[in-house]
Image: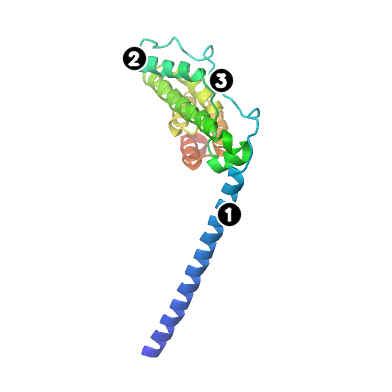
Amino acid sequence: MKLPFFASFIVFCIWLFYELKKQHHKEAKIANSFWEREAAANNTRKKPLDDLEYISIPFDFLPMGVLKDDPEVSECHQLLWNLSEQKIVNLTGLSNTDLKLQYGAPNLPVLIDYDQNYTILARTLQKWASLLYQSGYTEEAKTILEFAVSTKTDVSASYAILSDIYRKNGQTQKIESLVQIAEGLHSAMKPSIVRILKESDPHND
């Protein structure tokens, strides 16, 4: 009885050793690939930033006059005005290594600033739209959120509120359009956003 058990144990140990060695080799290969890319990125010369998709805030299009005296809304307005004086680019999904390879290592600090500006923009638009939506200004909130989505925001709440507005307005075809936009996002939030939209679409019942 002991011999079969011992033989099975030996086989298990050999298999475990093999799997650990294979995993170690896989991890080493991934690490080597990363450091090779990082080395190449750090040696990439500065390149023009002309092909970046800079975002402009359309103040004439947005509902700037609604609840403008509300302190929280006013704060959102001020943040947007401040952002409008800076460059804004949505670089979601691109790592620092990706950015250095594409635009050159010397451009990394300014690209990080551009992307941080976008993060502030996306969050501010969401907060502003939510404030108006909760106060009954549905159409105005929709306008803000549609602009946010056009910039490929990955703030899930923006999609949730906008899809709710579309559903209540009987514009379910627009929810389907939102799903297509969400499926094209380069963000870790994509699966969650797509799920939220599909659950809100009555055609998926």
First of labels 3, 2 by sequence position: 3
- Compared to residue 39, the image places residue 159 above or below, namely above
Location of residue 182 (image quadrant): top right
Mark 2 surroundings within 10 Å by alpha-carbon count, few (fewer than 14), some (14 through 19), many (20 or more) = few
First of labels 1, 3 by sequence position: 1
Q: Position of residue 100 (x, y in %)?
A: 58, 39
Mark 1 surroundings within 10 Å by alpha-carbon count, few (fewer than 14), some (14 through 19), many (20 or more) = few
- Compared to residue 117, the image places residue 62 above or below, namely above
Q: Which residue is mark 1?
A: 33
User: Can you tell which of label 1 and label 3 is closer to the viewer?
Assistant: 1
Label 3 secondary element: loop
Label 2 secondary element: helix
Tag 3 near tag 2, CB within 8 Å? no
Q: Position of residue 55 (x, y in %)?
A: 56, 23
Q: Could you tell me the amino acid type at mark 2?
A: Pro
Q: Mark number for residue 71?
A: 2
Q: Could you tell me the amino acid type at mark 3?
A: Ser
Q: CA distance from mark 1 to mark 3?
A: 37 Å
Tag 1 near tag 2, CB within 8 Å? no
Q: Could you tell me the amino acid type at mark 1?
A: Ser
Q: Which residue is mark 3?
A: 56
User: Can you tell which of label 1 and label 2 is closer to the viewer?
Assistant: 1
Tag 1 near tag 3, CB within 8 Å? no
Q: Residue at x 46, y 80 (%)?
A: 11
First of labels 1, 2 by sequence position: 1
Q: CA distance from mark 1 to mark 2?
A: 51 Å
